[in-house]
Structure formats: C-alpha cells, structure tokens
Image (spheres, rainbow, N blue to C red):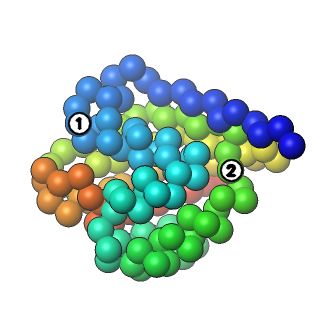
Amino acid sequence: MIEAMLKITIPIDCGNSPKMEFLKQFNIAFAESNTSFLLESVVDDITWNILGDRLINGKTEFSAELDRMKSEAPTELIIEKIITHGKLGAVNGIMKMPNEKSYAFSDIYEFSTAKGSKIATITSYVIAV
C-alpha cells in the first residue's frame, strides 16, 4: 500500500512569533494525524466546538475524535492566515481530501494563559467548498 504524501502550503509570515509557529505546527499535526503532539498541546479539560456538528469536552473525547478523523486524512493543507494576540489565536485555510472534496476552515483558539502553549478551547467553522 502506497501512502499519499501530504502537501502543505503556508505563507512565509505564518511563523514569525512563537505562538504563530505553534499554531502552524498544531495544524500540520492535525492534518498528519499526529495525535501525540495534539494531545500534548491541549489542557485536560479541552473544549472543541465544531459549530453545527458536535461539542467535544475533555481530552478523552478529543482523543476519540482525533482517532475517528484518522480515516479521513487530507491530501493537502493550505494555511492562509495565522493571527495571534494574547490568549487568542486563529487559523484559516483549506483542507483537500482524497475524494476530491475540499473544506474551508477557520479555527479560533484560546490558550490556557497568555504565555501558555496549551490550548484550552477551539471553535471550528468548517464549510464544504
């Protein structure tokens, strides 16, 4: 079985601060199904609200959702913008899937503290395009 390579496109300025670099790596880990990195990057009582779809509470549910999504690995990740300020961050872009479908996404992140590197909440907007 030949595994497809993930194509990643990211603007040059999307890593010019530690928090921007962290969110870039977090999104790459998500696209690559790097569950261990993702679980290390969130607080134990993480809340992930995928608007219009589901609300995930806690690391156990978060881990189960990541495992469920592994079967739908994207072929391409395009990050368009990463914005950070204080405890907040946002990433938007497009994920292209093997079945030729594409999804535009915008994720809003709240960190546990302004200087922290653990994510406390994620609010995701996902639209088929």
Query: Against 3, is 52 above or below?
Result: below
Q: Name the residue under label 2.
A: 73
Total tally of numbered discs in the picture: 2
Q: Residue 18 carries which label?
A: 1
Quadrant of the drawing holding the N terminus: top right
- Whether residue 60 is situated above or below residue 42 in the rendered picture: below
Q: What residue type is labelled 2?
A: Ala
- Residue at point 32%, 74% (across, down): 44
Q: Check the image and name the residue furthest to the right.
A: 1
Q: Is residue 91 visible?
A: no
Residue 87 on image: x %, y %: 18, 54
Foreground pick, 13 / 1: 1
Q: Which of 10 and 101 is in front in this view?
A: 10
The kind of residue on which mark 1 rests is Pro
Q: Residue 39 location, x and y as percent?
A: 41, 62
Which comes sooner in the sequence, label 2 or label 1?
1
Residue displayed at 66% across by 59% down: 70
Q: Where is residue 122 in the image (x, y as percent from the top left)?
A: 38, 62
**Secondary element at image label 1:** helix
Give the residue drawn at x 65%, y 35%. Answer: 6
Q: Is residue 94 visible?
A: yes
Q: Quadrant of residue 108?
A: bottom left
Looking at the picture, does residue 45 appear above or below residue 24? Answer: below
Name of the residue lying farthest toward the top: 12
In which quadrant of the rendered view does residue 67 lie? bottom right
Q: Is residue 4 toward the left or the right of residue 123 in the image?
A: right
